[in-house]
Amino acid sequence: MVAEINVVPYIDVTLVLLIIFMVTAPLIVTGTIDLPRVGAASADPPVAVEVTILRDGTHSVRLRQQGAEAQEVLPSQLAAAVAALKPQPDAPIIIQAEKDVAYDQVVKALDRLQRAGLGRVGLAVRQE
């Protein structure tokens, strides 16, 4: 009695499958991707309003563009100051807070802005 495996049939099956895949692979139709066109893109992205919360609890508001100066506001007047600065109704609002600021202050600022009906509020983070 011989205790060895005959691998010739396995090699034959593997080669037949390889040939089948090589013949059918070029026949597979790939999907087309509908890429955006240059003319369809919006001209300029909307200017964002930037809310800064510092470690000592002070809030400042400014437009996120070159040369814009920040104006310090009280937390209770934050929503009114942001609404006055928004150049467009769909302009995004970005909240950036120092790393040591209590999470509670950031959540309160988010809540004040959302209660005033100001949408598209996001948080700024630094990627490291």
Image: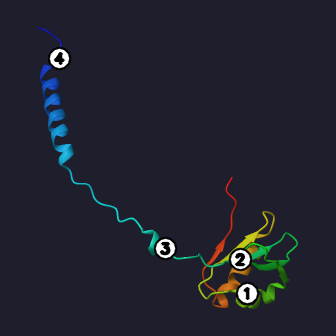
Compared across the picture, whether 126 is left or right of 61 comes to left
Image mark for residue 5: 4
Residue 51 falls in which quadrant of the image? bottom right
- In this orientation, which residue lies closer to the viewer: 5 or 119? 119
**Separation of marks 2 and 1 at Cα, in angstroms:** 21 Å
Q: Considering the numbered disc 2 on the image, is that residue within a helix, a strand or a loop?
A: helix
Q: Considering the numbered disc 3 on the image, is that residue within a helix, a strand or a loop?
A: loop
Residue receiving disc 1: 85
In the rendered image, residue 89, in percent from the top left (x then y), is placed at 61, 88
Q: Considering the numbered disc 4 on the image, is that residue within a helix, a strand or a loop?
A: loop
**Separation of marks 1 and 3 at Cα, in angstroms:** 25 Å
Which amino acid type is shown beneath numbered disc 4? Ile
In the rendered image, residue 128, in percent from the top left (x then y), is placed at 69, 52
**Separation of marks 4 and 3 at Cα, in angstroms:** 64 Å
Question: Few, some or many C-alpha atoms within 10 Å of disc 3 (few <14, some 14-19, many ≥20)?
Answer: few
Between discs 3 and 2, the one toward the N terminus: 3
**Separation of marks 2 and 4 at Cα, in angstroms:** 69 Å
Q: Is disc 3 in contact with disc 2, using a CB cutoff of under 8 Å?
A: no
Between discs 4 and 1, the one toward the N terminus: 4
Image mark for residue 41: 3
